[in-house]
Amino acid sequence: MKWLTKLISKKQQRDPQQSNAYDRIGGEKVIAALAKQFYLQMQSNPETQALLAMHRSPMAESEQKLFEFLSGWLGGPPLFEQKYGHPALRARHMSFAIDSKMRDQWLLCMKRAIELEIKLPQHREAIYQAISTLADNMRNR
């Protein structure tokens, strides 16, 4: 039984020799700035007020969860999964009416955050394409 406890308690370690988006764009610092910028964009853009209304105040908890999710999603430490389990994003967002309009508002904020926080154009484009697919799959209306 000790082997099972050892296996379960073993933390997931990522291979630091394996390059990934997380490392290439600047790691934790850039991911944290990206999450922060996303919520700043949502709060300041008149075009995203319907999206903003779907979020609870204060935004700090949502910002932290986005940071944790993006960390693992981009190949870094799986912070969200360690705290909350598998992201299961679609299921977690099912109680919110997410149509094309909400998806587009979310992507507007994310695109601007990516433009401001990620330096290299090829990284910005690759991440935006991937996150666009993810956002499109979140639609439930």
Image: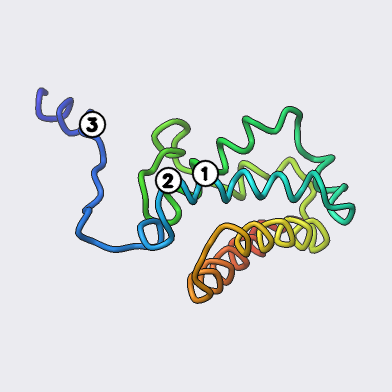
Question: Looking at the figure, which quarter contains the C terminus?
Answer: bottom right
Q: What amino acid is at disc 2?
A: Glu
Which badge, 3 or 2, comes first in the chain's sequence?
Answer: 3
- Judging by the rendered image, the residue that carries numbered circle 2 is 28
Under mark 3, the amino acid is Ile
Is residue 130 found left or right of 21 in the rendered image?
Answer: right
Residue name at image x 25 percent, y 49 percent? 14
Gap in Å between the C-alphas at discs 2 and 1?
6 Å
Instruction: Say which mark, if any, is on residue 32.
Output: 1
Q: How crowded is mark 1: few (under 14 residues within 10 Å), some or many (20 or more)?
A: some
Query: Residue 8 — which label?
Result: 3
Sequence-first tag of 1 and 3? 3
Look at label 1 and name its amino acid.
Ala
Please name which of the two marks, 3 or 2, marks the residue nearer to the observer: 2
* Residue 73 rendering spot, x and y as whole percentages: 45, 53
Q: Judging from the image, what secondary structure is the residue with disc 1 in?
A: helix
**In the figure, is residue 54 to the left or right of 111?**
right
Instruction: Find residue 114 and report its image quarter.
Output: bottom right
Distance between mark 3 and mark 2 Cα atoms: 26 Å
From the viewer's side, name the closer residue of 53 and 10: 53
Q: In this view, does 1 lie above or below 130?
A: above
Give the residue at x 37% y 55%.
75
Residue 6 x, y percent position in the rendering: 15, 28
Q: Position of residue 23 (x, y in %)?
A: 35, 57
Q: Quadrant of the N terminus?
A: top left
Q: Do the residues labelled 2 and 1 touch (CB within 8 Å)?
A: yes
Residue plotted at (56% across, 47% down): 33
Crowd around label 2: few <14 · some 14–19 · many ≥20 (10 Å): some
